[in-house]
Amino acid sequence: MSGKKTGALRPDAADWIALVLGLCALALRLNDLGAPSASFYDELTTLARSLAPSMGEVLRAARWQYPPYIDFQPPLYYLMVHAAIGLGHTDFFARLPAALSGAASVPLLYLVGRRLGGKAVALFAAAALAVNLHHVDVSQQTRLYAFYGLASLGALWALLRALGKNDGKRRTVAAWALYGVFLALGLYTSYLAGTWLVAGLALTLLALIRPAPSPGVGNDAGDGQPAPHRRRSLILGCLLASLAALLLFWPWLTATAGMRGYLLAAAAPNRPALGTALAHVFAAFSSQYATFTGRPELPWLLAGPALLGLVAGLCTRKRRFATVAAVLWFAAFFLPVWFKANATHHFQARYVLPCLFPVLLLAGMLPAALGDRLPRNLAGGALRLALSVLLGLTLAAPSLPVYPSYYRRDDSRLKPLAAFLRDRAASGVALDFAGYSPPWTRFYFATFVRWYLPGVFEPPLPENDRSFRECLLVTPADDQAPPPPPGAAFLGALARVRVFRTPLLNAAPLLLRPNTAGQVFFETDFRILPKAFAHIWDSQNIRIKPKGLLPADRSASGSVTYAFSPLPGQRIALTRLALDARVTGYPGIPVAGRVLVLVGPALDKLVPYDPGALPPPGKTLYVRLILEPGPRRETVEVTRLALAAAVSGQPDPGITPEAEGQRRLAANTLVVPYEKDALYPGRRPLATLPASQAGQAAPLLVATIGDTAYVDPALSPDYGRLAADKPLTLVNPGSLSIPLDIWKLAGSPRGPHLTVGGATFQVPLTGRNLVATLAAKGRGEAALRPLFTPDGYDPDMADVADRVTRLPREPVLTCPDDKPCAVTYALVTGYPARTLRLTWFPRVFADAAGKNGLQAAYSLDGGAYRPLDALTSSGSGRWEGLGVGRTVTADLGGFTGTLRVRFTLSDDAAQLWSSLETPMALSLSLDTGSLPALSLPPGRTPLRADCPESDGVLALPMPLSDSPVGAP
């Protein structure tokens, strides 16, 4: 290799500028990457596939499109996200592949642009892409489009290298091989990449017939027209690389042919007008967020420079090939998507994201043509590069009002919902969903739980002999949602759902009362979860919906067991059984799913049901249904189970059906005698009262069965409340000691002393309406969470309220007029505080004068206030903020004393929001090593408090989830 050729590979000023632009692009795409909740449909769909337990399961899910028809794409990007969330189960890691792909597209576009149009065109396009808000947004979604765009750029770059100067056979072969690899990556990312094959061949033919040289990599001199003896090798190289990519993709293409044909055939065409589609694309590329700023969309902001650049490129001989290539590139990606738009896959700008790259290259032709008129010296060269970068950056002008914090909207509010549910989780609490109201469906709810609440709740049916006593039931917040079951207590509404706490009472094995002929009958009822729950003895991997039972995870079989026992002394025998089930398979493929029915007098004596060979009588009749989805995960559903049995013999003396039913209910639901001032750490069992006293228990009443009313003491505002004159009793009904590792404290404490049995310790916390979770010999958190809702606003919670007022119809604090106001919250800690964390939702009208704004500051022990965060006016003339909560932290370095956080509002055009969906919180990370680790022995232990405050505090001790608990 000659010295001249080696020198051409050294980075110059333009290369270093491109590197800086790439780093800026990376910073923008990583900014608050994990802050917003996952979005419905798109991000939850990707997560559903990527959360499969193994890469093999990811491939199978993408092949068979299960859950059915949710995302019609090849598996590569799901595998990438699957690997990424293996590094961390957070939104940040789920979106990291997209963010890295988006950032890498900037320097790669520079390399493509430099080879096509020269340095000026390349820097213009790279600068514009680095700050393009549409591309930033796509790069911050758990979706494949950013990587799809990167792969398209890689394919074009490799193709241009192969079509460029003859640098030797080895480099040419390597370039064609790289082109084939990028083609294969694109095909395994999206079926839309099939158009690349045609586009690549067209560009190759264009390169063979171009009448003028194309620009080179290192300078604005062209590569030169290929020599005649190379034309055949270039066509052959393109065909071989394309064929290799197709061969790599062929196994997947053939394996999914039937499903792909079915999905495409089922969709009706829905193609927009060509002009409408072009306007939509250019509006998204240039001013997608104009609606957030209250301004009209500006498709001509980018279409205009692109058309001018098109004219300038065609008029410039050395850029004519690059201009025609960019137009061909745009058409190859735009026209197939527009032409194939249908009712299932509407035409969307992100489907044609690769079209953004040739548009930016075309827009860069005009600045490059202007730069050609500058002197060919060092100063002129520097001015050309600077002009290209600055003009490229100016294309982001309409998006400046929403930089850098508000281009991501948290519309789903799934993270606040997850925090709301997690705060109400406890041992033995299940979580379930009922109803159908898009976007809330069973599939998206299940994905939401797997992503944000893994392992937090029990399954909603009895499983693995674990005890339950309540369920948090989530229903869509609309008029079509099913009514909550009897006894359900409303907890709150946010994220377009309502949350109820409903009791789960189970009396299995079921006691069926015989008729005069000694016959008993049973039929399933799936309409109400608590009723279906009460019938089931045990289950594995089963979920329920109003019309039937089906596997919760269709990658594995599920089973449900029913048990029927007469009164002690009697025997039961099955006489007949009826089962309704359905298996929904895939079109044109034989169904492999099935339902097996096993019956018998004992769990170890179950045999397949045969009407001609019924099992012998026994003390209990067991019926087990096994739902097998088969290798293709068909939908297997049991819609009805009905049976008849014969009861023989006489019950033991003194046994009554009423007493036996209550005994079984108590054994399964941990029912204990009602005690007003007793706590059961880690259990929270139901308490009982005579049904005649049920009226006195409202609103604690959750159900009435027979002569017994069931009440939930945890629904009482006094549950767990301690005061100097109000001690409590801790009850451990088991046979083993319970370690009290966690204490939850709520109220307005002023450093109370707690006494458990003979152990006394202080909780050195003081605050108004404070909530704290403290771990013995470990870490803890103390938080102030003020709400500004009509039913939750407490003006006394503030330490100082200087002229602030709450808006009557919104969860908002603001100033009463155009003068400044402020509100201050205080918290005193004797535990060393490591970190202050503030989550808040400010909103401001961005006036042109830049006067409006909000500021958060903190003070330690009465010292000067230090800035924490601020939202100031950008002059956009619209309301800004509230889309995504702002979260900031400050290192306190083990501080003990009084912490104050002050919010200063400029006037009534500044607002401070706090509600269940926009929850403001001031929290301290504490070192609670001084909190003693205690043990609660079996039996009863007194809990007392030296509470100086009149209302006392709520103190709820609880064991860790893996602490041993003895049988009652």
Image (cartoon, rainbow, N blue to C red):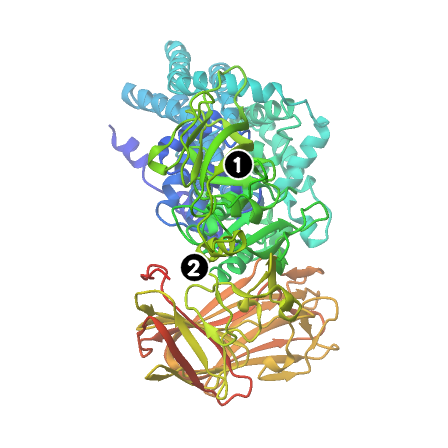
Provide residue 286's location: percent of width, then percent of height: 63, 43
Would you say residue 113 is visible in this rendering?
A: no
Residue 819 percent location from the top left of the image: 71, 79
Q: Amino acid at mark 1?
A: Leu
Is residue 103 visible to us here? yes
* Disc 1 secondary structure class: strand
Q: Which residue is mark 1?
A: 549
Looking at the image, which is closer to me, 573 or 911? 573
The amino acid pointed to by label 2 is: Ser
Residue 907 drawn at (x, y percent) = 70, 75
Q: CA distance from mark 1 to mark 2?
A: 25 Å
Q: Tell me the quarter of the image containing the N terminus.
A: top left
Q: Residue at x 65, y 71 (%)?
A: 696
Q: Quadrant of the C terminus?
A: bottom left
What element does badge 2 sit on? loop
Crowdedness near tag 2: few (<14), some (14–19) or many (≥20) residues, C-alpha within 10 Å = many
Q: How far across and how far down the image is residue 868, in percent?
A: 50, 73
In the picture, measured across the screen, residue 830 lies left or right of residue 37, that is left
How many tags in the picture?
2
Q: Could you say which disc has been placed on residue 427 in the image? A: 2
